[in-house]
């Protein structure tokens, strides 16, 4: 099978891709530990794809336990250059209703206990996160969603995703604070995922599935895990359809991405100045 240039990170409620055929499982060891689960490769309408369940199949990892570096490294090692992150989120805006889809273009990182870089320990890089989402990949997701003509949900293009540590949901005061800082949706997993994808020179975009109104809304019940998962399962079929459409569009165009050359202007320590051990540890990440 050809290298899977397209990868999918499945979030809460999306633990497999129904459209994958010729499925093969890969147990991958990385310099940053093991990924959340085996990486599953296969084909979607003839296109090679890699899929990884972010929280593991069976959902056994809280957000802080997800091995983000190992996940991104493993996908990059298989050849992934375009990565779709499917993520459950809470809505911080009245107009973003539960079951709607959002394609955020900005992030606020409020996580506290996660390693957010492949670098350090002998190598330095400072990637730009001014545009943390690949515009070309996000546009393809929008095209795929609009092409399906869903009657029961709305697409919101753009917006800010605030990422909290979790695993507890917000207090009401926190939820109102996130609204005041301009955040539109809230989740627990897209940071440092997006930062690591940029360091790995992988185009990254989020397909966010709104499940609830967090706890800020004065007229709607506060979010619970049961509520979030129930709504996400309702939208899982829609997400599966979007992925199939988006994969076909990506395969047909293989768009250039701002991410694909991210290290060209960000790498401070040149490879020749790194020790052999550091070059080996970062060899997959440094590969264009």
Image (cartoon, rainbow, N blue to C red):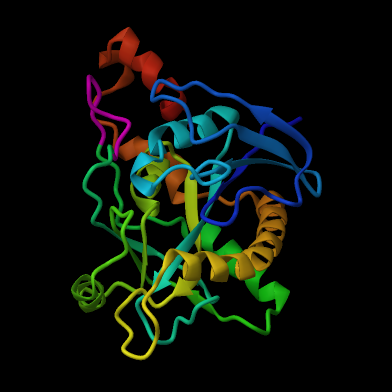
Q: Is residue 52 magenta?
A: no
User: Is residue 123 toward the left or the right of residue 184 in the image?
Assistant: left
User: Is residue 187 toward the left or the right of residue 209 in the image?
Assistant: left
Occupied quadrant, residue 95: bottom left
Depicted 67 relative to depicted 89: above or below: above
At 61% across and 49% down in the image, what residue appears? 15
Question: Where residue 59 appears, x then y in whole percent?
Answer: 51, 46
**130 or 245: nearer the eye?**
245
- State the count of labels: 0
At 50% across and 21% down in the image, what residue appears? 29
Depicted 100 relative to depicted 70: above or below: below
Question: Where residue 1 appears, x then y in whole percent?
Answer: 76, 30
Depicted 33 relative to depicted 184: above or below: above
Occupied quadrant, residue 266: top left
User: Is residue 20 toward the left or the right of residue 260 in the image?
Assistant: right
Occupied quadrant, residue 154: bottom right
At 48% across and 82% down in the image, what residue appears? 97
What span is in magenta?
116-125
Q: Which residue is at the far top?
A: 276
**110 or 58: nearer the eye?**
58
Question: Where residue 202 appears, x then y in whole percent?
Answer: 48, 42
User: Is residue 135 toward the left or the right of residue 7 in the image?
Assistant: left
The kind of secondary structure the magenta stretch mainly shows is loop
Question: Where residue 123 appears, x then y in whole percent?
Answer: 25, 24
Q: Which residue is at the far bottom?
A: 219
């Amino acid at each position: 099978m050809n290298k899977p240039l397209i990868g999918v990170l499945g979030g809460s409620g999306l633990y497999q891709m129904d459209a994958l055929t010729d499925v093969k499982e890969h147990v991958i060891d990385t310099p940053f530990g093991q990924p959340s689960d085996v990486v599953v490769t296969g084909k979607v309408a003839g296109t090679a794809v890699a899929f990884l369940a972010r929280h593991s199949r069976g959902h056994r990892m809280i957000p802080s336990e997800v091995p983000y570096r190992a996940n991104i490294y493993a996908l990059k090692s298989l050849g992934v250059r375009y990565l779709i992150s499917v993520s459950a989120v809470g809505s911080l805006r009245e107009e973003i209703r539960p079951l709607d889809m959002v394609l955020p273009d900005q992030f606020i990182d409020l996580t506290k206990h996660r390693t957010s870089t492949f670098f350090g320990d002998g190598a330095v890089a400072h990637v730009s996160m001014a545009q943390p989402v690949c515009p070309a990949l996000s546009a393809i997701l929008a095209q795929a969603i609009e092409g399906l003509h869903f009657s029961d949900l709305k697409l919101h293009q753009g917006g800010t995703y605030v990422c909290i540590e979790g695993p507890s949901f917000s207090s009401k005061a926190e939820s109102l604070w996130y609204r005041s800082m301009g955040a539109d949706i809230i989740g627990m997993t897209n940071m440092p995922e997006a930062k690591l994808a940029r360091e790995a020179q992988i185009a990254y975009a989020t397909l966010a599935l709104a499940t609830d109104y967090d706890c800020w809304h004065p007229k709607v019940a506060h979010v619970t895990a049961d509520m979030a998962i129930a709504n996400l399962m309702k939208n899982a079929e829609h997400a599966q359809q979007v992925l199939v459409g988006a994969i076909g569009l990506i395969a047909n165009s293989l768009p250039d991405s701002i991410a694909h050359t991210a290290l060209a202007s960000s790498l401070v320590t040149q490879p020749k100045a790194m020790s052999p051990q550091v070059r080996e540890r970062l060899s997959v990440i440094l590969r264009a």
